[in-house]
Image (cartoon, rainbow, N blue to C red):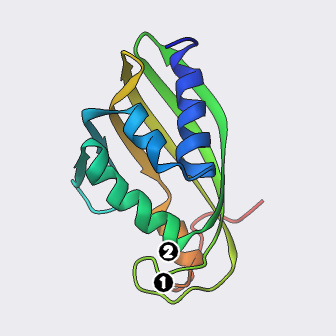
Amino acid sequence: MTGSHADFMRRWFDQVWNLGRAEAIEAMLAPNGRVHGLGEADAVATGPAEFRRFWAQFCEAFPTRRFTVEDVVESGDKVAVRWRARLIHGGFFQDPAPTEKEIVVTGIAFAHVRDGRLQEGWNNWDSLELARQIEALAPVKPILPRA
C-alpha cells in the first residue's frame, strides 16, 4: 500500500460508502477483519461477507449518500476518523417506511490498519439522531438550549 493509513480510511469512505463499491470491501477489509458498532449492541461483523450484509441493507435504505471525512488522526497502525453523512432515506431501515427526506448523521470510526487492509474497526455513530430523522422515534427535547 502506498500512502498513509489516513489516506486508506479516506479511500474506504469514498469507495465503500460514497461510490457503493462492494468489491472495495473485499479488497480493503481483511478476510478475518472485525467491524464493531454497526447497529445492534455487541454485534460484530467478521470478514467481508458479514460486513456486506450490513452495508447492503444500509445502501438499500439510503441509496443516495455522501460521507465526508472531517478529521483524521493517525498513530502507527491506528487511525481515528470523524465523519458526517448526508443521506436520502429512500428504503426501509429499522422498520419505518421511506421518507425521501435528506438526513444528516455524524459518527466516529477508529480503525486498525495493517498490510493495506482494515483489520478491525470500531464505529460510534448517532443512530438515535438517524432514527429520529427517519421518524422512527418521537422528537426528543434537548437538555440544553440550542445556540
The numbered disc on residue 112 is none
- Which x, y percent locates residue 91? 53, 80
To which quarter of the image does residue 65 belong? bottom right
- Which x, y percent locates residue 22? 46, 50
In the image, taking residue 109 as reference, residue 82 lies left or right, namely right
- Which x, y percent locates residue 60? 50, 71
Q: Is residue 15 in sight in this rendering? A: yes
Vertical comparison of 86 with 73: above or below? below
Contact check, label 2 and label 1, Cβ < 8 Å: yes
Identify which amino acid the numbered label 2 is placed on: Ala
**Residue at 36% across / 36% down in the picture?**
121
**Residue at 47% across / 68% down in the picture?**
128
Please state, as top left, top right, bottom left or bottom right, where the C terminus lies in the image.
Answer: bottom right
Which residue carries the number 2 mark? 131
- Which x, y percent locates residue 26? 38, 39
In the image, taking residue 85 as reference, residue 44 lies left or right, namely left
Vertical comparison of 47 with 58: above or below? above
Which residue carries the number 1 mark? 136
**Residue at 31% across / 44% down in the picture?**
48
